[in-house]
Image (tube, coloured by chain):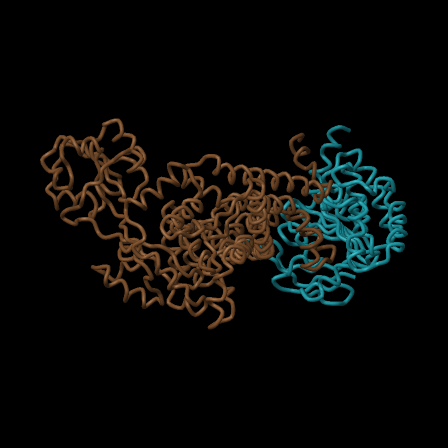
Amino acid sequence: MLVLCATGLVQESAQEPVHEPVHEPVHEPVHEPVRVGSKSFTESVVLGEVVRQLLVAEGFEARHQTELGGTRIVFEALRAGELDAYVEYTGTLREEIYAGRDLAEDGALEAALAGDGLRIVATLGFDNTYALAVRADTALELELETVSDLVPHTGLVYGVGHEFLERSDGWPGLAARYGLAPDSVRGLDHDLAYRAIAVGEIGVMDVYTTDADVAHHDLFVLRDDRTYFPAYAAVLVAREDLDERCPGATEVLGRLADALDEARMMALNARAKIDGLPEDAVAAEFLGEAFGLVGDVRASSLVSRVARATGEHMFLVGISLLAALLVGLPLGVIAARRRRLGRVVLAAVAVLQTIPSLAMFVFLIPALGIGWRPAVAVLFLYSLLPIVRGTHAGLRGVPRPLVESAAALGLGGWARLRLVELPLALRSILAGVQTSAVINVGTATIAAFIGADGYGKAILSGIRRDDTAQIMEGAVPAALLALLVQGAFDLFERAVLSPGLAAQNERSNDG
Amino acid sequence: MLELRGVTKSYGEAVVLAPLDLVCARDETTVLIGPSGCGKSTLLKLINGLLVPDAGEVRFDGTRLTPQNAQGLRRRMGYVIQEGGLFPHLTARDNVELLARHIGIASAQRAARIAELCELAHFEVDLLGRYPRELSGGQRQRVALMRALMLDPEVLLLDEPLGALDPMIRAGLQEDLRSVFRACAKTVVLVTHDVGEAAFFADRVVLLRDGRVVQEGAPRELVERPAEPFVEAFVRAQRTGWEAMS
């Protein structure tokens, strides 16, 4: 994140010195960055990059928090003031964010957003909604242009996504509105549907109107002539107070109004998804063509990316594990000493384990925002169980005669714990901490969902771009780090565990 | 030295000790004997303060034992449990001096005391660096005894100290134990279920059954003047093997 900022600064002064005086008369030079967010799919990342690079080109400092874990997380971050702007779809705002308000029209959105201190600063000009598509040659042959044209052709096989097939606002409603009664409708995975339509196994499929694969597979999108599908117009949502911190930013963002239509967006998606161009390069291309601006593309080597991700990852794991130790050990001791309280403590840490991480993130954003703080908090909570359990089990497993011996010697409770019980429970405690650490290394990859990066970021990008090499860039170091942690703990155990205990297992095996 | 008055103890429904009185005189060896479950180990734990009686009182050198003063008084009572109760993560030396070090006794002083104890308990100094698992059963019991004697306590409590040993080692350790008791002139309370052992150590034997004192006195008295048929039966049960052979 810091690296990114610094790069932005350097580029700003190197490339756009002329813009500095523009802001100077009214305010001190603006150094507070505009924080842009995006969700974990290509179109969102490309548009986030477009917004960031536009701002940089206009002399602002801007950061782009890519691939946040989902609508809820990005929107909550925006509302909490952790982000300043991101591209959303009106349909998503209506149906998902303000689902309870029953907003029938896009027009009603302005008021709802204003209630959260937000506003739409630009309507980008394209819709990314559901549509039906056929192969271009089929469209020509059967003279298909609109969905209504499909009605007489009942012999065409429909292959639609499982979700689309079930949703009342999906296939059932669509068929009813148009009077579609095909002989065969099959539920299909989206990626499989593209392959199936290419070889002619199905004739019609559901698509998103800006889907890169539509162009790639040479499909023809049928017009929704009875306007069945809801509007999913892409809009740039920003905080109303953006100009207070970054004067003039809103105006710059407004330049994106009507800058893209479906075809153009689809082309940009295809550049990223089909041609494999990085999103920042795609965004730079677009800014060059549409506004004649020079984009801000950062190149980085594999080594520097992995090194940075390793640093971020180890930071997340280290802090969360340390905190879990500081809390988990005393909890384990208390749990072992007081049976009833112990049961409550063990149940509580076990319940924590069952809360899905994304739910926990959404829950934590108002208090901790996005970035490393909520990530560390979630990892901390997940790390507690093995540590508390290991400590509890270890202490409960200390043979009663030894506990009595220690008491009979005249050692006080605290001294007994420190000199006898904890050393005897050490193996079990260490096993718990080790389990925590290894799981933590793996779990920390979810931190990318909330903008804390680490190895998870490469994994998420790789999955999104269907780029195995990029997935490996995150997955392999994560696996190696897990092995390293495991090995380090084995060595540590050998170093600190009393030789009097080390051979205990062998002995009992002999017996 | 030790006085128990009207002491009772039960675990839930099970009464382990009925109201019981017991006095152990200074510098005498008292042996508590009886069949399993007669409450003799419980009695030892009450004396040591590991257990708190439901009723009655325990006095140590005139002071009533309470949960508040138990920890301090325990340091004046050495305690050896059946399997020795040595801490497996500590060497023999660390086991012996654990408490002494904890309460801040200087290392030179500790070393001198350990040397003394090794001689007394017939334990080879070379073995002090070993962990319990590297010692034989007899050696472990000697270390446990040294640990109990480290702070030169006034009272020594032993719960079946020879119980887990095989007969040969047992005989040797038995001799050594008795010479230690005599050399140190301590008030000793020893628990056993073995009549022969009781006779070997005891100045006075206390025979328990179901949490009550059945008979107490010099070992010879139990054989010659059993108070009730149970005493005779208990004593004879352990001697029949020998008699059958002779």
In the drawing, does residue B226 fall left or right of residue B116? left
Task: Describe residue A159's horizontal placement relative to residue A244 as left or right.
Answer: left
* x then y, percent, for residue B159: 72, 48
Q: Left or right: A393 with respect to B224?
A: left
Q: Position of residue A138 (x, y in %)?
A: 18, 31
Q: Is residue B192 visible?
A: no
Task: Out of A299 and A36, give the one closest to the viewer.
Answer: A299
Identify the chain drawn in cyan.
B
Q: Residue furthest bottom?
A: A26
In percent of the image, x 48 and y 38: which residue is there?
A470
Is B161 situated above or below B186? above
Q: Residue furthest front?
A: A18
In the rendered picture of this protein, how many numbered marks are placed on residues?
A: 0
Q: Name the residue nearer the viewer: B16 or A243.
A: A243
Relative to the observer, which residue lies in front, B168 or A170?
A170
Image chain in brown:
A
- The relative height of residue A193 versus residue A127 in the rendered view (above or below) is above
Identified at 41% across, 56% down, the residue is A362
Q: Percent x, y for residue A459?
A: 47, 41
Quadrant in the picture for residue A304? top right
Quarter holding residue B53: bottom right
Instruction: Give me the residue at 73% from left, 58% from top.
Output: A410
Which image quarter is the C terminus of chain A in? top right
Q: Is residue A485 visible?
A: yes
Residue B161, percent from left and from top: 75, 44
The part of the image, by quadrant, that contains residue A100 is bottom left
